[in-house]
Image (spheres, rainbow, N blue to C red):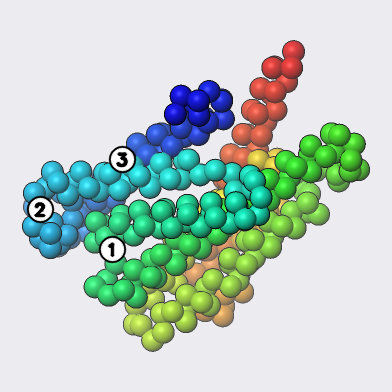
Amino acid sequence: MKRWLDTTLNRQRLAWGVGMGLGAMVVILLVMAWLNSLSVVPGDLLLVRPAVLAALGWPVPALLALELALAFGFGVSAGLAVPPMEGTGAAVAVRTAIHLAVSSALFAGICWVCGLPPGNWQGLILLLGLYWLMYLTVWLLRYLHWRAELESIRRELGLVPPGPAGGPLQIRTLGPYFLVSGAMELAVPPLLRLAEGTSDIPVLTGLFYPYLLLPFVCLAVGWSAGRRLGLTLVLPAACAALTVPHVFLLYNASSLFQAGVAAAFALLGNLAGAAWQRLKRERKQREGL
């Protein structure tokens, strides 16, 4: 362990893991309080789900410790995620599969202590499917970032010609991000509608997609593009435009707010990523002096 901590990168990963684990513990408590506040049963807010507590028959402190442990573990698994492209292709595949399996088990445990999945295995698979979509999005964006770093190193060594000029209105360099956001925004809603079938309440397309998946995907795409390319004003506009077809195919005109959601979260992520890129560049310049 001491030898592992000798490198700066590993110390940073450990700090990220512990920090995200503690943050996840705070989030799980807030989520529990919010979920319990929706209950029609009067009484004080609880930090554990009454239904899960009754099913297990455990004391409150034991269930509270379990949910905090699951949240901390899930946060650590996200913070300690190794950059997916290190090593050979086989090593990448094995490491990704192990990380996905562990984080999926922790995510399923969190869903269970929150009382989220219905009383059947199909409900749990559905929640895991939503998590796997998010995981795939992040994995693809991290792959693009790794390719950008490799290309930058090759360019500095003179092995490839200089890339095209950037700027807020750049379009050519945004192709991979258009593909990721387009795949998610154009392919996922019809699949979710098929999964809903003839349900009277469109939970997936009416709640999960516009209020969870869409903001997450646009925020992640904007962040990744900002870290690599800086400010890109075309990307939020493209994310907004990609929501329009399904507004009229699957929804109605009242769902046009999804375009605003997509643009706002893509712009927010892009601004944060661009700021991170600028701070990183300035730090390198100071270290070089």
Disc 2 marks which amino acid? Answer: Trp
In the displayed structure, 103 sits above or below 276; it is: below
Task: Determine which of the numbered discs, if any, sits on residue 26 in the image.
Answer: 3
Instruction: Identify the element where label 2 is drawn.
Output: loop
What is the count of numbered marks?
3
Instruction: Identify the element where label 3 is drawn.
Output: helix
The residue pinned by badge 2 equals: 58
Disc 1 marks which amino acid? Answer: Leu
Q: Position of residue 149 (x, y in %)?
A: 72, 41
Q: Give the residue furthest to the top.
A: 289
Which of the two labelled residues, at mark 3 and mark 1, occupies the earlier sequence position?
Answer: 3
Q: Is residue 247 left or right of residue 150?
A: left
Which of the two labelled residues, at mark 1 and mark 2, occupies the earlier sequence position?
Answer: 2
Image quarter (top left, top right, bottom left or bottom right) of the C terminus: top right
Task: Determine which of the numbered discs, if any, sits on residue 116 in the image.
Answer: 1
Q: Position of residue 53 (x, y in %)?
A: 13, 56
Q: What whole-number distance in Å separates the C-alpha atoms at marks 3 and 1?
A: 18 Å
Which of the two labelled residues, at mark 3 and mark 2, occupies the earlier sequence position?
Answer: 3
- Where residue 263 sits, quadrant-wise, is bottom right
Name the residue rendered at 37%, 39% in the picture: 21
Q: Position of residue 69 (x, y in %)?
A: 28, 44
